[in-house]
Amino acid sequence: MSIPKLELVSLAKEYNDGAVVAVDGIDLSVAPGETIALLGPSGCGKSTTLNMVVGLEEPTSGDIHIDGLSIVNIPPGKRNVGLVFQDYAVFPSMTVRQNLAFGLVVRKAAKDDIDRAVDEVAELLGMGGRLHVRARDLGGSEMQRVAIGRTLVTKPAVLLLDEPLSNLEAAARLTMRRELRRLQSEIGLTIIYVTHDQIEALSLADRIAVMHAGKILQVEKTSVICERPDHVYVAGFLGSPPMNLLAGEIAPGASGAAGPAFTHGPLTLALPADCPLGKGSYTLGLRPESLRLVPESEAPLAGTVSLVEFRGGDVVVTVDVASVKLDVILPATERPAMGQSVGVDFDPDSLVFFGGDSSRRLDVRPMGRPL
Amino acid sequence: MNDTAHDGRTAPVLALENLTKSFRGKIALDGVSFTVPKASLTVILGHAGAGKTTTLRLIAGLDQPDAGRVLLAGRDVAGWEPKDRDIAMIFDNLALYPNKTGFENIASPLLIRKTPRPEIAEKVQAMAKVLKIGHTLGRLPATMSGGERQRIALGRALIRTPSLFLLDEPLSSLDAKLRIELRAELRRLQSEHGYSFLMATPDFNEALAIADTVVMLRQGKVVQIATPQALYDQPVDRETARAVGAPLINILPARLDPEGKGLLISGWRLPVPGHLHAALAAAPDGFELGIRPENLGLADLSGADLTGVVSDIEPLGLKSVLTVKKGEPEVRVLVESATARTVAVGREVGLCVKFPAMLHAFDPLSGRRLTA
């Protein structure tokens, strides 16, 4: 097995003598040439993690390896990691060439080597014709390219990107996403990409590590994480809109009922007699994509449309079923009115259950068949 | 008070008539007119610098227009002080009182108006419930997350019941997820209480999701006023089509073949959709074809409308965007990720147009959408 490019081992960061745990013992292994996204809301510990890798913050415990060697005692400047963050930190009065050369000039590299490295990176970024332009005359996405290029010239072992696109306007963000994907495939960089935006994580990363409250809850290939969230939090974070999650109980059905029933507050859903889930607490997941609106008389659930969000190609309809809000994705042509009474139906095979205590996904189909 | 012909009871909450404003010789607003009906949510959509904030400031009375009128419930408010306009304005990053608790921050507009204490407590609790910040009421802003602070700020603005709320990018500093949750809350609040909202945003997703009416602002001018669906399906011009929708609409230079039977797009050829026949016949020098990425789908090579080679696959969760090229022209195609996994970069694929009636044609010079 090849040695991981970057490895985080039980990495933790506490503040105020442990009163605040920003990063709570995380393990993560990043293969050479892999792009991994740390995805989570603000305050989840993702930036703190990055800062420890860069050396801006010291871990409370745990270790960080690059190419199998611990770097925690190496000063930030010598770790051979490149950091790019959302405020471009490009020198406005310098030209693109001077900006790109900066890291090497500081390291006192030979002039010829600097020129060659800068030309190479400028070519890679499509900025070859803009080397003489002053940074302050650049557009936002060009500025961000220079910031990335400035890091690339130093040939870092690992490139760390902290919300690098969040200051760009929507159109520039799309261009840069494509640009970054091309860069990854052309130069095979190992990248840690920190973001709160699932679309960026999904479009750029090979794998996604979802963080919440200082912990990594799931690390999974980008291509399948949306379809197979392993933890309630991940299920509630990914997807637009995410899965509908109902915390409730499974109990034996009333006399006469065929099987057990799942209850969430006032809402009850009959399960078949051969449902393999025993009595206890569970969270039921219902995907907005697998729900549909049907006449009330035919539906297992009935409620009132409380919100209709148009998205262009489709609409997200929120149906209040008792006190529960269910999001349903429908084609734009099937748009109900706010306040309309509707029934909600679903494909039984699309139900997902999570353990009430573990919050982990249970690998059973409630309708009896194993996955 | 300068009453006009409008009747205050039936007049819209807000009407702008030909509002014009320059700053240091530079035109910021150029004849802006639109109305906000009572109990509606109107969104001003535009890029940075389009004039969104200027418009809101003129309505609030923080700046004075060079020309044009602001009518509130039918009354020209020229010369009225901001405080007399019965308007609440909500900015991005509203400053909270740092030494006051969440409760005191939300309650502050009511305290100033000397509302009785029990009524204040009741109103603040109700507002906190809606905004899901009950747990922060006893805390100081410094101990709250960014999202909690922004919700306190929203609560403080919404605790009053002015005749019009102006919201200037109220959600832009929030996390992606929180932003989506809060915009739904704002919409619910607005529609349940019958508030009148005028909100400015650069985010088309936000505009489409919650607006009754979108006012598309570009370089100080109103270019289109429409429902979200009409804005998306019948954009007035190419720029509007590009500003609304992700992935970006495909815009391809095209012309009619000599017999007028096919659309020629470089190496591609499509049948002429019926609704565009007349318009295209009148565009002899060519036009630009607009195809939304979700209006294209994969098809068998043999029966395909278009063929090309996959040059990029962008996974977006359950959906993915393919870029398909044929020489120069390329198109983005939105497909299910399960479908995307059946192709690879470098592979030749066939594409079909799902709804020919949803194809657009634009004048290449003016950018206007061509209609028969």
Image (cartoon, coloured by chain):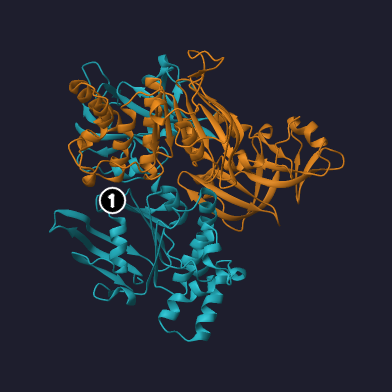
Dot 1 amino acid type: Gly
Residue at the outermost left position: A17
Residue B225 located left or right of residue A180: right
**Chain A colour as displayed:** cyan
Question: Toward the viewer: B119 or B204?
Answer: B119
- Looking at the picture, how far across and down is residue B58, in whole percent? 49, 34
Find chain B in the image and tell me its colour: orange
Residue B231, can we see it? yes
A116 to the left or right of B352: left
Q: How many marks?
A: 1
Report helix, strand or loop for mark 1. loop
The image shows residue B350 at horizontal and vertical percentages of 66, 47
The residue that mark 1 highlights is A43
- Identify which residue, A252 or A208, lies in the foreground: A208
Residue B296 visible (yes or no): no
Q: Left or right of B169: which side holds B369?
A: right
Front one among A29 and B137: B137
- Tell me the quadrant of the picture where the N terminus of chain A can be found: bottom left
Q: Give the image quarter of residue B39.
A: top left
Left or right of A41 in this view: B203: right
Instruction: Please identify the quadrant where the C terminus of chain A is shown.
Output: top left
Picture residue at 49% right of the left edge, 41% below the top = B203
Label 1 crowd bin: few (<14), some (14–19), many (20+), radius 10 Å: some
At horizontal 43% and vertical 32% (from top left) the residue drawn is B166
Question: On screen, B26 above or below A78?
Answer: above
Q: Residue at x 66, y 41 (%)?
A: B238
Q: Please state which of residues A297 and B124 is positioned toward the viewer in this rendering.
A: B124
Q: Residue A287: x and y, percent?
A: 39, 35
Q: Compared to A157, does B83 lie above or below?
A: above
Residue A331 x %, y %: 53, 30
Q: Using the image, name the chain to which the residue with label 1 belongs.
A: A
Quarter where residue A240 is shown = top left
